[in-house]
């Protein structure tokens, strides 16, 4: 498969936060209490994590080539250092136009907070976002010229040529509380803060014990995740009637942000996963040196 990308020099961000902010909480999978401190950084630094609890404070770039694993979250690693469940924070930074930030963390997993990206968006907005004065420093937006996709069974995620960036997602579950849902979000016309960021992660009561026996979701609770069974949601109300599919868009935004810039493309996914999101992002990265 050959993928052709060109660049649009008129669209870009080149922004960082104006001042540091801090949030802390429990990690979804590890159950570990961690503190995150996000600080301004220059454009040439990009977004990167710093494990301040480890000797030498190793740096883990928030880049697609540093993805280590994708089991129910996205984990980045560099050498012996890793950081897990990065997608919500990275989605919030990217959607708010922050393409450079130093993210200091004192543990192995970004806190889940309320299960959404909204607390991160609030924190970003509380300190403000600033752009660089030099217009030549603004990154160029890649424009997709040909479709690219990955699939596993009937699940897929694709990037299609489009005049502006757009995300569309479909999910289909047997549980009546979810069923089949589709949602589409266009960053240029709809606010991430109101339409996507508040959507919380979700799971299924029947899978909890099995996942915990595998060392997963140790920090999950009814306070930070929507949970449903055959009778319905265990912790209503939902923030949106289609909150689950909106959360899937949130995850996709966070994973694609590991490219460093969103291509001008329509991202279309169905029953996909972090694994497929990352596979698509890697194909895009391999095709274009600008990422």
Image (cartoon, rainbow, N blue to C red):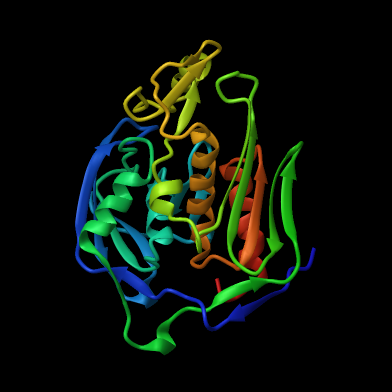
Based on the displayed image, in which of its 4 quarters is residue 165 positioned?
Answer: bottom right
Residue at (25% x, 53% y) in the render = 123
Q: Which image quarter is the N terminus in?
A: bottom right
User: Which is more toward the observer, 167 or 252?
Assistant: 167
Based on the displayed image, in which of its 4 quarters is residue 117 positioned?
Answer: top left
Point out residue 80 in the picture as x, y percentages from the top left corner: 39, 50
Based on the displayed image, in which of its 4 quarters is residue 99 positioned?
Answer: bottom left
156 horizontally vs 241: left or right: right
Q: Above or below — where is 46 with respect to 210?
A: below
260 horizontally vs 150: left or right: left
Count the marks: 0
Q: Above or below — where is 246 with respect to 260?
A: above
Is residue 81 in sight in this rendering?
no
Determine the residue located farthest toward the top in the rendered image. 231
User: Which is more toward the observer, 195 or 27?
Assistant: 195
Residue at (37% x, 58% y) in the render = 93
Q: Which image quarter is the C terminus in?
A: bottom right
183 horizontally vs 161: left or right: left
Q: Above or below — where is 217 with respect to 151?
A: above
Residue at (52% x, 82% y) in the render = 10
Residue at (37% x, 50% y) in the render = 89
Determine the residue located farthest toward the right in the rendered image. 1
Point out residue 33 in the picture as x, y percentages from the top left corner: 24, 36
Point out residue 268 in the picture as x, y percentages from the top left corner: 66, 51
Point out residue 277 in the picture as x, y percentages from the top left corner: 60, 49
Is residue 123 in sight in this rendering?
yes
């Amino acid at each position: 498969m050959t993928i052709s990308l060109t660049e649009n020099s008129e669209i870009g961000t080149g922004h960082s936060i104006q001042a540091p902010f801090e949030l802390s909480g429990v990690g979804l999978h590890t159950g570990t209490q961690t503190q995150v401190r996000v600080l301004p950084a220059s454009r040439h630094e990009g977004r990167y994590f710093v494990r301040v609890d480890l000797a030498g404070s190793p740096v883990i770039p928030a880049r697609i080539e540093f993805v280590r694993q994708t089991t129910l979250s996205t984990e980045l690693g560099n050498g012996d250092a890793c950081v897990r469940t990065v997608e919500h924070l990275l989605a919030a930074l990217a959607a708010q136009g922050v393409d450079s930030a130093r993210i200091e963390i004192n543990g192995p997993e970004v806190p889940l907070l309320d299960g959404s990206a909204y607390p991160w968006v609030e924190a970003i907005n509380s300190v403000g976002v600033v752009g660089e004065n030099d217009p030549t420093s603004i990154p160029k937006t890649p424009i997709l010229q040909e479709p690219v996709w990955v699939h596993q069974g009937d699940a897929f995620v694709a990037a299609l040529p489009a005049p502006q960036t757009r995300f569309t997602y479909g999910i289909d579950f047997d549980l009546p509380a979810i069923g089949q849902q589709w949602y589409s979000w266009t960053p240029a016309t709809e606010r991430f803060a109101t339409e996507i960021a508040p959507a919380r992660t979700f799971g299924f009561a029947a899978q909890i014990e099995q996942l915990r026996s595998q060392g997963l979701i140790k920090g999950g609770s009814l306070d930070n995740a929507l949970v449903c069974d055959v009778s319905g949601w265990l912790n209503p109300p939902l923030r949106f009637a289609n909150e689950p599919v909106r959360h899937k868009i949130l995850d996709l935004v966070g994973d694609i942000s590991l490219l460093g810039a969103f291509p001008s493309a329509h991202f279309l996914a169905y029953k996909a996963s972090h694994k497929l999101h990352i596979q698509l992002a890697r194909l895009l990265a391999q095709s274009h040196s600008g990422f």
